[in-house]
Amino acid sequence: MKVLKFGGTSVGSAQRIKNVAALICERGKNIVVLSAMSGTTNTLVEISDYLYKKNVAGAKETVNMLQAKYENVISELFDSEEYREKARKAVGENFDFIRSLNKEIFTLFEEREILACGEMISTALMTLYLQEKGVNVALLPALDFMRTDKNAEPDTEYIRTHLKALLEEHKDADIYITQGYVCRNAYGEIDNLKRGGSDYTASLIGAAIGADEIQIWTDIDGMHNNDPRFVENTKPVHELHFEEAAELAYFGAKILHPTCVLPAKLANIPVRLLNTMQPEAEGTLIYNSPGSRSIKAVAAKDNIISIKIKSGRMLLAYGFLRKVFEIFETHHTAIDMIVTSEVGVSVTIDSERNLDAVVDDLKKFGTVTVERDMVIVCVVGDLEWQNRGFEAEVVNALKDVPVRMISYGGSNYNISLLIRKEDKVRALNLLSKALFE
Ligand code: ASP
Ligand code: MG
């Protein structure tokens, strides 16, 4: 059995829902994870925002607009009035529920309940559509098996046993459908796996049932070897190691959610990225043992801030780095890149939020320099250090670009370079030319 996850754009209109339905029917007995139709979760966030602000009119108007949108989807999706009526009822229940939350006190709990509705609606529509077509489909409610523990981490044992029981209960079904993103927390309350969390759902389900494969269906043909927005003729990478995929996902390759990689990797289940618009394209296969020793892809992450702390006190001293890192910890600021010398250390962060407080504290230990508008360019591949020449190729490609930091050897899979924002597009193109042409 496989797990097939379809993102918001893949189910973004009545026509797309029909396409996905055809696609999943061809592929046999699998578990299908759906996101909310594109735009819906954002609209639900907006509705919650109005309710937090006690703007009842704003909330009502937005709810009505969203419901009208679904009204159109329903008219177009179904053939019979009978199923249109069923769909209106199912969708309407969600909207009635949202309207009922317009209470005196609006909190995080109510917001989470609202956010869950997007996936409830998309799965209800798909289930009814398949039923109208005569498919024996079972809707597995995510709220009955997807659960997080007291640390907000997935409760894998709970997920495994409850999902198994549900599958057993519906063992004659041809296809299983479930909601991505939605879960219950340790207290049994409705919660979610954070924005973009449907990939995570798919990965957790895959690990729970020991799936043959986890397929993430989006609207591009796999992970590309460079950013198609800035570089022409990028190509899909056919095979990636999980570690390479994790680096790329973090460094801006938007197609796979970073958290998604871990459960699949640990359970040793391959993840395949596929394109709903072009189902026959090979896509990208991510697994634990791709063979080739090569550079696979380049990605870039914007809005990086570098901080340099220079201090005579660092020379031959121990404990200096600990003190520096403690400051970042105190201010809940994650460090991305780090390079050190005998007299200084440079780090990068990707958020301005606690920058002033961090810098204030760092000044106790040395001279601090901050540079904004930087970009991390990350080159990913099988860069095991005994393989000769890869780092030279990368540095050589950028010989005419000012490079502020280089980080190599932190893992076997990545070289990161910090450059100025204005050099980004040039750097990405130079790298593509040198590494992939
Ligand atoms: N619908 C949720 C979101 O937009 C989850 C997902 O699409 O993965 O964040
Ligand atoms: Mg998404």
Image (tube, rainbow, N blue to C red):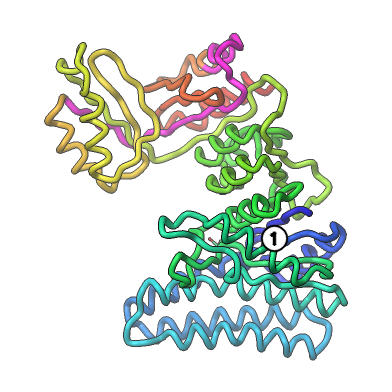
Quadrant in which residue 89 is drawn = bottom right
Apparent side of residue 222 relative to residue 381 in the rendered image (left or right): right
Q: Is residue 191 magenta?
A: no
Residue type at mark 1?
Ser
Q: Residue at x 71, y 81 (%)?
A: 74
331 to 62, vertically: above or below: above
Residue stretch rendered in magenta on the structure: 367-394
Asked if residue 373 can be seen in this view, the reply is no
89 to 336, vertically: above or below: below
View quadrant of ligand 1: bottom right
The quarter of the picture where the C terminus appears is top right
Q: Which x, y percent locates residue 35?
A: 62, 63
Report the residue that reaches farthest toward the left. 364
How dense is the environment of label 1, judged by Cα within 10 Å: few (below 14), some, or many (20 and up)?
Answer: many
Asked if residue 11 can be seen in this view, the reply is yes
Q: Residue at x 46, y 59 (%)?
A: 149
Q: Is residue 387 magenta?
A: yes
Quadrant in which residue 341 is drawn = top left
Q: Nearer the viewer, residue 2 or 43?
A: 2
| Residue that label 1 marks | 10
Q: Which x, y percent locates residue 11?
A: 69, 65
246 to 254, vertically: above or below: above
Apparent side of residue 6 relative to residue 384 in the rendered image (left or right): right
Q: Residue at x 38, y 79 (%)?
A: 51
